Image: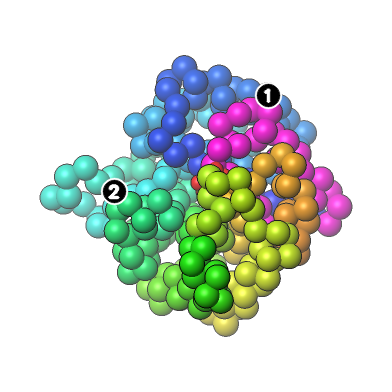
Amino acid sequence: MKQKLIVGNWKMNGSLAANQALVQGVLAGMQGLNVRAAVCAPAAYLASLQVLLQGQTALSSGAQDLSMHESGAFTGEIAAAMLREFATRYVIVGHSERRQYHGEQDAHVALKAQQALSAGITPIVCVGETLAERQAGRTEEVVKRQLAAVIHTNGHCISEIVVAYEPVWAIGTGLTASPQEAQQVHQVLRQQLKAATPQADRVAIVYGGSMNAANALSLLQQPDIDGGLIGGASLKVSDFLAIMAAASQCAQAS
Ligand code: PEP
């Protein structure tokens, strides 16, 4: 029975009050579900999230980014060790919005993953092609290049990461890769991980890009789709719970 991993990415949304209602609703509704789950909050809310999640293990806390440096004169940046102090279990690295709006490149993403791993935090490494790259038939080349940088820098620790395949054209657009399209890319990523570590099967490869209550089950039923990274639908208790319920159903069936 393989548990799926469902991670919410709140992006730059929320407030103290809204987060509390969301987390309490999710915790209440996920009882009895067979799923691993986390929510990645804006850094400003990690301390309050730690309090909201205290004393339970069903839902973990995650961050959306971290510094590629350990400490020092990097104004505005947040170090892995700082995240660790707030019981942060996961951190997203290389999200396409960071690559697109903040100029993050493969080498930066690899160093961020390294910082996370050295602090005992699981990096959720995002890879994915743009629409132009897909249309040019370059999807595999792009995602393999992005993951290769992280493998190269992190060597034997690579089995400790989570990979998120997030086609850029599917993020926040309502467009989703079909289950077959997503599975095909996940399979390529799995092969790449297998060539890098004998423990590749330990690595969760999750799908992200407009996953919602309606399409979650068909995506999560694919053999190499180990979970989901959910943006918009993670902000609504009922939608997020419906995705978790689909994940739980897949775990029971396997
Ligand atoms: C994301 O931000 O990682 C994401 C997948 O967003 P959405 O689900 O809204 O497409």
Kindly indicate the quadrant of the structure image that contains residue 111. Answer: bottom left
Q: Position of residue 52 (x, y in %)?
A: 50, 25
Asked whether, in this view, residue 153 is left or right of residue 126, the answer is left
Most foreground residue, 43 or 154: 43
Asked whether, in this view, residue 178 is left or right of residue 13, the answer is right
Q: Is label 1's Cβ within 8 Å of ligand 1?
A: no
What is the quadrant of the N terminus in the image? bottom right
| Residue 28, label in figure | 1
* Residue 230 is inside the magenta segment: yes
- How many numbered marks, from 0 up? 2
Q: Along the polypeptide, which appears first: circle 1 or circle 2?
A: 1
On the question of residue 80 being in view, the answer is no
Most foreground residue, 101 or 199: 101
Dominant SS type (magenta): helix
In percent of the image, x 42 and y 22: which residue is there?
15
Tell me the magenta residue range.
226-254
Residue highlighted by disc 2: 79
Kindly indicate the quadrant of the structure image that contains residue 104. Answer: bottom left
